[in-house]
Image (cartoon, grey):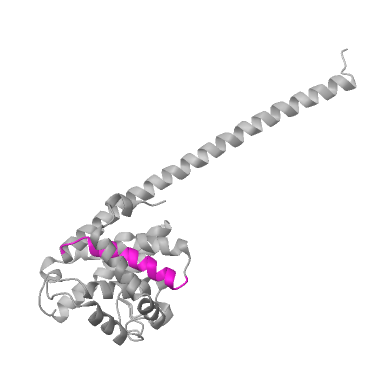
Amino acid sequence: MLTLNDNDAACADRSFDDAAAAQMERIVVDLRRMYLERNEALREVTRAHHEALLRLALAADFRDDDTGVHMVRIGYLAEALALALGQTQGFARMLRRAAPMHDVGKIGIPDIILKKPGTFTPDERQSMNRHAEIGAGILGRSRVPLFQMAAEIALTHHERWDGNGYPHGLAGEAIPLSGRIVAVVDFFDALTMDRCYRKAFTDDVALDMLIKQRGAAFDPMVVDAFLDQAAVLIELRECINRQPPSFEELAESD
């Protein structure tokens, strides 16, 4: 009968340990590769969804304002205002990507209402106000954080600090910060651009109108931050007007 001496047994143990360690290392390498491939696949899916939503947002904005630059400005102004409020880079960056989809729900509003040059009837106003919920519905209940924030903004950027907004009459800090920030930048930017029913207001007039809505339509803290950074934000707007980012830059999702 053959038996292993102590040296032979030790060598066998080391051989087994080396083989097991090599196999474990291969498993770890394979798992790491699979993890990286999975993450890249998820990024591609997220990027594709983001591009599709951006195209919807562009379509809605073209129907409303005959320009896609408004939605671009909203994103960059919201990002800058978030940073001025002391929010993190991550929050501000996501806000820049999500904010352009704030009015995506206008894709579901009939042109006869959307492009009406005069005052809305009560029924037309009710129909127009549905764009907030339509937008949130388009963006859906996604598990992707970017889409979650975009849906939140679409739903809440017409709520008012005093509770008299729509669609749910939220008041004060019950309105998500993302919605409160986009409400302010959307208000100012919309006032200072030509619309189908009026000419653009000057920056000074728009700022005065913003001040008058401090504590009524808008969060006083957000308004104060906007006023404090007004010169910087207006220059950022002009920079975007001179050289708007490409669609590829807007769709970037990493």
Q: Main secondary structure of the magenta part?
A: helix
Name the foreground residue: 216 vs 42.
216
Q: Position of residue 150 (x, y in %)?
A: 35, 63
Above or below, comparing residue 151 to residue 202 in the picture: above
What is the span of residues highlighted in magenta in the rendered image? 66-86
Residue placed furthest toward the top: 1
Q: Is residue 2 left or right of residue 157?
A: right
- The residue located at (12%, 71%) in the rendering is 196
Q: Tell me which corner region of the image, top left, top right, bottom left or bottom right, holds residue 16.
A: top right
- The image quadrant where one finds the N terminus is top right
Name the foreground residue: 107 vs 204.
204
Q: Where is residue 25 in the image (x, y as percent from the top left)?
A: 64, 33
Q: Where is residue 228 in the image (x, y as percent from the top left)?
A: 38, 78
Above or below, comparing residue 42 to residue 29 in the picture: below
Give yes or no for residue 205 being in the magenta stretch.
no
Name the foreground residue: 100 vs 234.
234
Q: Is residue 67 left or right of residue 224?
A: left
